[in-house]
Amino acid sequence: MASDERDAAMRKAVLQIPRGKVATYGQVAAAAGYPLYRRQVVQVLRKAGGALPWQRVVGSGGAIKLPGEFGREQRFMLEMEGVRFRGKRVDMAVHQHTFRKRAR
DNA sequence: CTTGTGACGCATC
DNA sequence: AGATGCGCCACAA
């Protein structure tokens, strides 16, 4: 199925985000080759249930989109990796990861 | 098949 | 800056 392929591509993209950096849902979707599937990135992260560095994926502008306890958890984990925050959002100017074309 | 939901993103107020 | 609306898309009921 094509959905498996999308899942795999997205998981890969997420795994490419190095420690101390973050990427947005939209970025991940685009890097995976499916720019319009930002919402599905979420599904993939949930489905992976901890097998992925889910904390490195944030909303546009570096906003933490996960509500409640998990949101605070995510922020904590990121700060733990050395990510700096500016108010409620990640300092994207410094921590936003830039994906590269593969097989170069 | 139709509807509701969601860790989105962007325009708009 | 926070709230709302709309477009986008898969998935469950």
Image (cartoon, coloured by chain):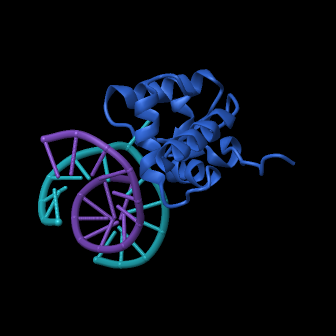
Chain colours: A blue, B cyan, C purple
**Residue at the spot x=47%, y=53% of the render?**
A38
Asked whether, in this view, residue A56 is left or right of residue A16, the answer is: left
The reply to whether residue A86 is visible in this rendering is: no
Judge by depth and name the residue closer to the eye, C7 or A94.
C7
Q: Where is residue A67 in the image (x, y as percent from the top left)?
A: 33, 36
Asked whether, in this view, residue C13 is left or right of residue A11, the answer is: left
Q: Which residue lies furthest to the right in this view?
A: A104
How many labels, in total? Answer: 0
Q: Is residue C11 above or below residue A80?
A: below
Q: Quadrant of residue A91?
A: top right
**Residue at the spot x=41%, y=27% of the render?**
A72
Q: Residue furthest front?
A: A1
Judge by depth and name the residue closer to the eye, A82 or A87.
A82
Q: Where is residue A103 in the image (x, y as percent from the top left)?
A: 83, 46
The reply to whether residue A71 is visible in this rendering is: yes
Q: Position of residue A64 (x, y in %)?
A: 45, 40
Q: Quadrant of residue A97?
A: top right
Q: Position of residue A101 (x, y in %)?
A: 77, 51
